[in-house]
Image (cartoon, helix red, strand yellow):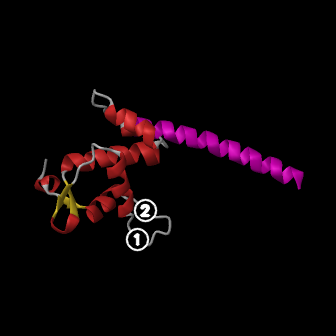
Amino acid sequence: MTKENEAYKTIGEVVKLLNLKSKSNRSHPTHTIRYWEKEFKQIKPKILNGNRRYYDYKTIELLKKVKFLLKDQGMTINGVKKILNHKETLKLDEITNASINVNNLKTKLQKISSIIKNLKKIK
C-alpha cells in the first residue's frame, strides 16, 4: 500500500475516485455517499471538526464495492445489505461480473431494437 492509499480522503475526493455523477453533471453528488452511510452500517468515515468526513482505504474499498453492486450490477439496497452482512468476506471479480453485465446489456439492446422495428411497422 502506498502512502497515497494510506492517507484519509475527503468526501469530495472519494466522489471523484468513485466517478459518481449527478444527473445534471453540474456538481459532485456527495449526498449519494452520505445516503450510503445511512443505509450501510459498515461505512464508517471519521468525522472530525466541523462535521467533515474523512475516509480511509478500507472504507473507500467498501464504497467501491457498494457502487459496483448498485450502479454496475443493478442490485437493490436490500440485496447489497445481504451481501455486506454475509459473515464470509465476498471477493468480487469485477472483470467477470462486468462481462456478465455486458451480455445482459446486449440482450436488452436487442429486445429494444426489436420493439422499435415493430413500432415502425405499425406506422
98 left or right, relative to 91: right
21 vs 45: above or below? below
Q: Is residue 114 magenta?
A: yes
Q: Residues within 10 Å of mark 2 (few under 14, many from 20)?
A: some
104 left or right, relative to 28: right
35 vs 87: above or below? below
The quadrant where residue 66 appears: top left
92 left or right, relative to 79: left
Estimate the x, y position of residue 73 in percent, counting from the top left.
47, 42
- Amino acid type, mark 1: Ser
Seen from this angle, which residue lies furthest left? 3
Could you tell me if residue 54 is visible in this image? yes
Q: Which residue is drawn at 27% across and 43% down?
A: 42
Disc nearer the start of the sequence (1/2): 2
Q: Which residue is drawn at 39% across and 45% down?
A: 68
Q: Give the range drawn in magenta.
A: 95-123
Seen from this angle, which residue lies furthest top? 88
Screen quadrant of the C terminus: bottom right
Q: Is residue 45 magenta?
A: no
- Amino acid type, mark 2: Lys
Q: Residue at x 67, y 43 (%)?
A: 110
Residue bearing the label numbered 1: 27
20 vs 102: above or below? below
The quadrant where residue 53 appears: bottom left
Characterize the magenta stretch by its predominant secondary structure.
Answer: helix
Q: How crowded is mark 1: few (under 14 residues within 10 Å), some or many (20 or more)?
A: few
Estimate the x, y position of residue 4 in percent, counting from the top left.
15, 57
Q: What element carries label 1?
A: loop
Residue bearing the label numbered 2: 21
Estimate the x, y position of residue 45 in percent, counting from the top left.
22, 53
Q: Is mark 2 on a helix, strand or loop?
A: loop
Could you tell me if residue 92 is visible in this image? no
